[in-house]
Image (tube, rainbow, N blue to C red):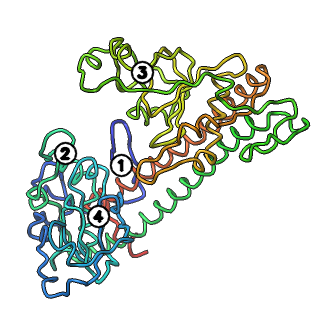
Amino acid sequence: MSDRIGPGREIPLRRYRPYPAYKDSGVEWLGEIPAHWEVKRLRFMSESNPVPSEVRGLPGETEVSFVPMEAVGEHGGLSLETTKQLADVKAGYTYFRDGDIVIAKITPCFENGKGALAAGLTNGIAFGTTELHVLRSTERADRRFMFYVTLSDAFRRLGEADMFGAGGQKRVSESFLRNFSPALPSLPEQRAIAAFLDRETARIDALVAKKERLIDLLQEQRTALITRAVTKGLDPNVPMKDSGVEWLGEIPAHWDADRVKWAAQMVSGHTPDKKVESYWQGGDIPWVSLADTGQLRQVDYIATTAVMTTSDGIAHSSAHVLPAGTVVFSRDATIGLCAITRAGMAVSQHFIGWVCGSRLRPEYLLFALRSMTRELERLTMGATVRTVGMPDVKSLVTPIPPPSEQDGIVSHVLHHRARIDGLVAKVHDAIERLKELRTALISAAVTGKIDVREAAAA
């Protein structure tokens, strides 16, 4: 017995037996179901998006939970840190109460499994984002079993296919929820399946949490590796001296510590006029902007950008085409993201470009900048729009070993970082397999492909 999740991936479920007898469900996606199960539309087992009639008599100052989309977990769980007064949320928000099932209805939240079985709400009541559907089980269905039905692969896959809307704002309709037709065992068996899934998914989630903690530890080791190499060198016995820079501390006695701007030409960025279409249509000059944030988190070198500009745009602005080998550095929004350009590129006003001279290798400067996280955090201003001011950028100091030593440090970091990254990739793969196993187990149990009654009683 196995359940296929994704192309070429099979999740073994051989430890569980099938039911003794099956029958045709009459539903194409469901196939055969246990002989004693029934197929029922959700509309006969639950109420969808109930009205808040229960709260009409409550005082307006009654505290209730408030749930934005970011408070809804993937595959279960609600963050209930925020409360509001009832008078402030009765209109314009989605209502639910303890025991209700909430399901994100907008892409990509629906596909990612955002949803929860509500519990522990303030005064048993919550209002939240309008991008939630709510299911309230009737006496014919166990709410936990129903919740696992909404987490099953078929529910999410068929719901995604049923989405309506244009572009990135597609939504799952209420009619999909009402007409979705799961297989339904008796109430005692629903409760047994739900208890089994509670236990087994908790075990899987605990394993995932341990592996995620291992990734955190590996990432800390990776950061420490880079910081140690670029600030202390590779020889543990070398004489040291005070750098005179608080975040840097002691450095090897034969190194310099100097402002980056004295060892590399600092060039601020600029944006050609966005109102002039000719500056942005058919452009062939890469232009590094905040649209490249995702890429900059992952790479040492940047070869392409999300947006291109034209030579006319450059000519009519304060932007410059910086040479290949320039270290670009973000000073706004996500501060400290950096990479080395593979070709001539311009940068927006949210970035600085450093063109290294003979004293500083671009790769060494890249790693030095990535070691300045705490210093950059100290210099950051603004709560809504975070930024490091130009005077502070100009004051940034880097250690400067001899060029040959910089080369050795870069080689050392690349070698040992690759080993750590390989371990992180393996742990990520293990986490994905555990998550696939979780989905497969839920799907197989709630569709009757495996008989978990004995396992639930164990």
Which label sits in the foreground, 4 or 3? 3
The mark that comes first in sequence, 4 or 3, is 4
Vertical relation: 253 (above or below) 142:
above
Query: Which residue type does callout 1 highlight?
Result: Ser
Viewer-nearest residue: 341 or 333 = 333
Q: Residues within 10 Å of mark 2 (few under 14, many from 20)?
A: few
Viewer-nearest residue: 260 or 197 = 260
174 left or right of 418 in image:
left
Q: Position of residue 364 (x, y in %)?
A: 68, 27
325 left or right of 203 in image:
right
Viewer-nearest residue: 31 or 356 = 356
Disc assigned to residue 318 = 3
- Looking at the rendered structure, the secondary structure element under dot 1 is strand
- Measure the C-alpha gap from mark 3 to mark 2: 37 Å
Query: Which residue type does callout 4 highlight?
Result: Tyr
- Measure the C-alpha gap from mark 4 to mark 3: 57 Å
- Looking at the rendered structure, the secondary structure element under dot 3 is loop
Q: Residues within 10 Å of mark 1 (few under 14, many from 20)?
A: some
- Measure the C-alpha gap from mark 4 to mark 1: 19 Å
